[in-house]
Image: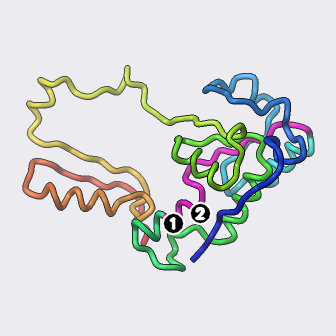
Amino acid sequence: GVSCGRRRGGDATGGEGRGAACVRPLGGDLDGVVRGAGTGISGYTEMTLRAASAAGRLGILHLTDSHPAAKNRYLRELGGLPAGHPELVAGDVCARVERELDEAGLVLVPSRLVADQLAAAGVPADRVDVEARGVNVLEFSPLSPSRATSQAKLRCLFVGQVCHRKGVRFLLEAARRLAGLPVTFTLVGPLRS
């Protein structure tokens, strides 16, 4: 199987003092920090982060998904995918993300789970900030109880790549368990096996 995890040494700024003045818990406030920083999405931004570091600027990595080692472990254990399956993160991509994690002065992650994955991989906690995704509940809120009970069917919509790593297996299992009830499931997105 593909393995991506390894421990990192050094201080909280990556061992070379990169971005020492900028690295701090952000508490959701990126204003004033992003100006002049080099930013990018994991797997595609190694040179940008290196250039930011060389220029004495903060390199910000957006890790939009699980750590590659954790993702591969979940896909093997929960999805039952065999070694070499195309949905597993390839070794070269794992290595590139590891180099980006080493280079970044700040890593933005979508959840506490991913922050914990990075901590387990040796990324110092003071270089990680959880920037949770969400919905404006003032604009998008559940139906009122009277409207909800008047609807004949519960409609479940999945939008995304239809594949193991998106958990579609569990959605399909839920659909099987709810067969015969007034529930419909719609999956929208490209197929990947």
Secondary element at image label 1: helix
Q: Residues within 10 Å of mark 2 (few under 14, many from 20)?
A: many
Q: Which mark is residue 69?
A: 2
Q: Is residue 112 left or right of residue 150?
A: right
The image's mark for residue 103 is: none
In the depicted structure, whether residue 145 falls above or below residue 23: above
| Image point (79%, 35%), residue name | 37
Amino acid found under the numbered disc labelled 1 = Arg
Instruction: Report if the CB atoms under discs 1 and 2 are less than 8 Å apart.
Output: yes
Q: In which quadrant of the rendered image does the N terminus lie?
A: bottom right
State the separation of the CA atoms marked 1 and 2: 6 Å
Is 146 colored magenta in this rendering? no
Say whether residue 70 is magenta. Answer: yes
Which residue lies under the disc numbered 1?
Answer: 73
The picture places residue 128, in percent across and down from the top left corner, at 67, 40
Residue 11, by quadrant, is: top right
**In the picture shown, does residue 121 fall above or below 154?**
below
Residue drawn at (72%, 40%) of the image = 127
Residue occupying the far top of the picture: 138
Q: Which residues are magenta?
A: 56-73
Q: Residue at x 20, y 57 (%)?
A: 175
